Every structure is written in C-alpha cells, then in structure tokens.
Amino acid sequence: MKMHNFGTNKIVYVIIAVIVIIAVVAGAYYYVSTAKKPVTRPTVTTPTTAVTKCPLPSNTSVIVSIENEPPNSVDPATGFYAGEDEIMVNVYQGLIAFNILSPNVTQFVPIIASSWWVAPNYTTYIFYIRHGVYFANGNPVNATTFWFSIYRVIIMNQVDASFFTNILYNGTEASIIGYAIPWGVCHAIAYATNNPNFITNKTLCAYGLANILSNFNVHNETIKKIMSYPNQAIVVLDPYTLEFKLIQPYMFFLQVLAEYPASAVDPVFVDQHGGVIPNQQNTYMNTHTMGTGPYQVAQWVPGQMVVLQANPNYWAAKLPPNEANPMLTPPRIKTVIIEYTTSASQIIQMLESGKAQLMGPLAIPALPPLYLPSLEQNPCLRVVIEPPSAPTWLFLMITLDTQKYPLNITAVRVALAHAINYTEIIDTVAPGVGELYVGPISPGMPFYNPSNLPPYNYDPALSIQILKSLGFKLTLPNGTVINPNGQPLSLTLTYVSDDPAQVKIAQEVQIMLSRIGIQLTLNPVTTQQEENLISQSCTAPTYPEMLIWYWFPSWPDSIYQDLVVQTNAMYSGIAGNVACFNDTTVNQITNILPFLTNKTLMTQYVAQVYNITYQQVPDLWLYAIKQYWVQSCYVSGVYWNPGVLGYYFALMYYNTTACS
C-alpha cells in the first residue's frame, strides 16, 4: 500500500521494513490515451471573431510536469511513494514491465528478459536474459545483476523489501531475528565457504551476504558457487538464465517483478558508493541513479525540482524492430523537468500560461478535483478522467482507532458510519471523479464487495438512537439534550492541512457530527506529522482517533494490498491497518488468503472478511477516486495504467498542430 505525500516527503513512508506484502491479483485495468477529437464548429465570416492562441512550447525537447510529490529517495530499495515511483519507472528497468498501452495489468512485455516460463504450480519462475543490455555507464547486465539487485533490496530491509516478503524471504523469521534474508542463501554461503556457522548464526549470515554484495565479483569462484546453489530464492543457472524459487505458490509474482524494487541496479556503481549494509539505507543511492532505463536523474533540488535527462547510452535504442515494444521506446523528449508545489494557484497559473505542460497523474493528482471544471473551459488544456468502465485505484477514508475509548466500542463506530453524508461530500469535494464504495477493496477491482453490501446510508436519526442507547450525553443543534447525566462524546479528526480536499471534508464532517450531538475537534497537521503520529503504538495517547487517509496499493493486488494489509492486525498503524483493527477470524483468514489459488475459495473468504469489517466499521469509506490529470493540448503520447505509477515520459512528444 502507498500513501500520498503533500509535503516534501516521498509519499514518505517511514514504514515498517518488514511487512508481509504479497499479491493475489488478477484484474482488468486499462490505459487511458489523451487524444481528443476536435470540435467541429460552423464557419463564421466576421472580422470580430476571437481566436484563442494557445501558448506554444518554447522548446519541444523539454517538457515540464507540475506535481506535488517531491522524492526523498530514488533507490529501488528505499523509495516507495508515488513521486518516487514515477522517477524510478523512467530510470530503472526490470525483467518485464506492464504494457502501458494495454487495457489491463495482466499483460507484460519483455524488457531485460527476452522470455520467461512459469511453473504450473506457481512456485518456479525462469527468465532468459537478453544479451547486449547495459547500464547508462556502459556496465553490462546479466542474470547475476538481478541476483545482486533483488538480494540487495531484501537484505537492506527497507520498505521495498516488503515486495518480496513471504515470497523470497520469510517475514515471520525476519521479525524475530531482525534481518530480512533471502531463503536458502545462508545454506548457499555455508556450502561455498564450508562454514556451517552461516546457517545457525543469522547475524553472521546477514553480514556475510552484505559483504558479498559490497564486494561483488561475478568471476570470484566462491560467489559463483553461492549464486548457483540450487536451494535458494534466486538461482543463477547460467550468465543469462535466472530462476526464482518461491517460498510458497504465488500466482501473481509477475506483477511484483514488473515493479521497480525488482529493477536492475549496477553492482559496480553501488559498491563504489557505500556498498550494502543490513537494515540500512544507502544515502548516496537515495539521491543518485544508475539504471538501464530511458532517462537518468540529471539534477535534483530537494523539495523543489527533479530533472530527468534522456539516457544517451540507452541500450534499447539499438534493438532491431522485431525485438522492440512500447516500453523500450527511446525518448522523443530529451529533458523532463518535474516541479513540485502544493499551491493550487501556482499549479493553475503554470498550466494556463504554458510554463507547465502536465499535471499529475500520480495516484493522487496535484490539483484537487474542485478545480477541474474551470480548467475544462480552457481550450489550451485537456482534462482527462478515466472512463466510467475503468476500476478505481485510489480511495479516501476516515480511519477510526479501534483500540482506544470511545472508538473501541463497535456501536459508536456504527453510529459514526451513519452520521456521514457521503453523497454530499462527493458532490462538494470530488464532483465527477468520486464514487461511493464499500471497502476495503477498491470498486471494479477483482474480488470487490462479493456480497454486494450497500454503502452505509446517511441516517443521523439512527446515529442518535444508537448513541442514546449507549448513555452518551448528546447536545443537539436545536438545544435538545439527550441523557443529560451521561458523558459527553467528543472526538478529534486529524487531516493534512495543505490538501484542500481534506480541509473541506474535515469541515463538513465536523458539521455532520454536530447534528448528532458529537463535538469534533479538528487537528490539521503536516504530512510528516501525520506519518509520525501513526508510527506510534495504536494505544499511544497521541495516536489519531480519527484520520483522513488516502489509500492505494503498491502494485495491482486487490487481495493483499487492499484487503489483507488494511484488516490484519499484523499491519497495525503505518504499515497499513491504520485503524488498528484486530479480529481473530479476520486475522486467521487473511494470513492464508494471499497464497490461495482457488478463486472460488478466495471469493468466499473475501466475502467473510467483508461482512465482518462492514459490521464492525474500522473505517468510514468516503469515496473512491477516478484517476485524472491535466495536459497541454500540444502534448501527445500520454497514457496511464495503474501498474505504472506516474507518467512514462519516453512515449511523449509534441504535436504543434494539435491546438489548431
């Protein structure tokens, strides 16, 4: 799962590094192209006819995108938030990629792998590596590069190690021993060094692996023996053949491998700049890139700007046409400038003046939907909203701390659920892009709401009745006092203050709760403060009682990334279950659900979890959000697919006649 960062963080996840994140997703997704048909107007022959002159790009080799997600890290082992995802998908490449031109995220195209094979039982995946792939600095790529790169992500044990938890390493063991170690590698090192202590001493093994990665030499006979050891997570069968051996069957491992934590990172570059240390970030790699992708980071002003420059040594530019695909297209626009701001007025001014050609489309666009109607009237801009048939990817909710009084009372949470006018919030905050839904899975995604449970209905009279039966003192707006000798009910709602949508929602919810006699205190915070608050124990006095919270999955994964992480007690707090919901039955089901392969059984379990959470109300589901963005009418080649977070700039180009 991912969060949004409206400030200077990377939708910064201070996340728990050992999270079990495994995906069971299939699902139809889509792309949205941005071309619009010209409007045919009748010919008017009058000298007073006004003609709109759209601002031409001053330099068609440069494109400017105005966004609100400044990165903290562009290391595939550490970066996690949407703004970082966008940079890494343009800089780094993996074995395969989502085809951004495809209408779904179950279709992949070969990138560094030329082909692959999946075992019928989903425990073994074999990839055949292309010859002639190299990093921007000219260093070659082969199977050993991926052994290094993915083992590096795991042993560093930062947030992106979570992509491989319980797939390539044992998450439960990692939480006990304090190290995330690829399964079997300790035996591999013991075998190659003839030292059994690497098996029994996990600290020795963790630092032994880090030392190998920090002094990586593919010609060293000991390292070659370790990489080719057959009983481990990743096996180098030969220099151009790579085998993944999963801990347990997992149908959707390809979705994980299509994401940036599985990208190739240059071992030589890493070892020249700090190497690898267990449980630690590499601060140099946080701010420098050396990938195989179409762009490289050329300049970075923290919190303000990132400049991507076309890779002049791009290996895919030399591919014969029969081996190429859209995700290997050399960039047509050579320089990408991403500027960051949370100021709506600045975003609008830059778009309307032509100083910026793009806005968004991160998971949460830079501009709230309230501003879209006026931008749609500008003939020089294109406002693009995903079609109604497309599944949503992002949603907004209010999480309730189920571990502290009074929200540890289920009936109180039920009363709150019926006190919110969800339709009114959508109409005023997200017109045209918001839709009612029943969580924890986003509408249109696989396994969404199997029992067709209706959204909570707005019924303040029912809310008052429930709270009255609990004995709370309620003072209604007309002066009526219910249970005058009872305890008043007061709550606090925390929200990010530089998000206009959250500010408006907080104000509306305050009014709605006042109608049922609840005094709601508003607590505006920065993104960093929000992250610090939910990094505490759920029972901490300052853990948010109620929190407005955006949610979207790290990769296409409706079971694990939506349902499991939000409802299993193992992930309480910032790890995903912000409501700290803890139900024994839900925990038992969600512990096994991601690894099932019988879809009928999976649907039954999902329905059971849905019914329990619906009745116990750990979250108030405000609305799901359709993806949208804004672009200059001159810009072509803009596509969006949920598997590719952010823009893929290599496909973009200027059509200087498009605004005629």
Image: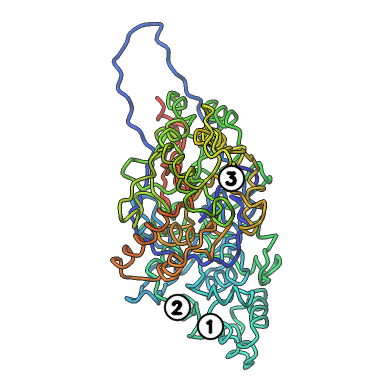
Q: Is residue 343 above or below residue 215?
A: above
Question: Residue 429, percent across and down?
Answer: 47, 33
Q: Is residue 589 above or below residue 1?
A: below
Q: Which mark is residue 184?
A: 1
N-term-proximal mark, 1 vs 3: 3
Amino acid on which disc 1 is placed:
Gly
Q: Which residue does the numbered mark 3 point to in the structure image?
A: 69
Question: Residue 160, percent across and down?
Answer: 56, 63
Q: Residue at x 50, y 78 (%)?
A: 233
Secondary structure category for the residue under label 1: loop
Q: Residue at x 43, y 59 (%)?
A: 563
Q: Residue at x 50, y 77 (%)?
A: 234
Residue 184 vs residue 579, the one in the foreground: 579
Do residues under tags 2 and 1 come within 8 Å of each other at their CB atoms?
Answer: yes
Question: Is residue 41 in view from this perspective?
Answer: yes
Question: Is residue 65 in view from this perspective?
Answer: no
Question: Residue 141, percent across and down?
Answer: 53, 68
> Which image quarter: residue 34?
top left
Q: Locate the C terminus by quadrant.
A: top left
Question: Residue 278, percent across and down?
Answer: 66, 72
Amino acid on which disc 2 is placed:
Lys
Q: Which mark is residue 245?
A: 2
Secondary structure category for the residue under label 2: strand
Q: How many marks?
A: 3
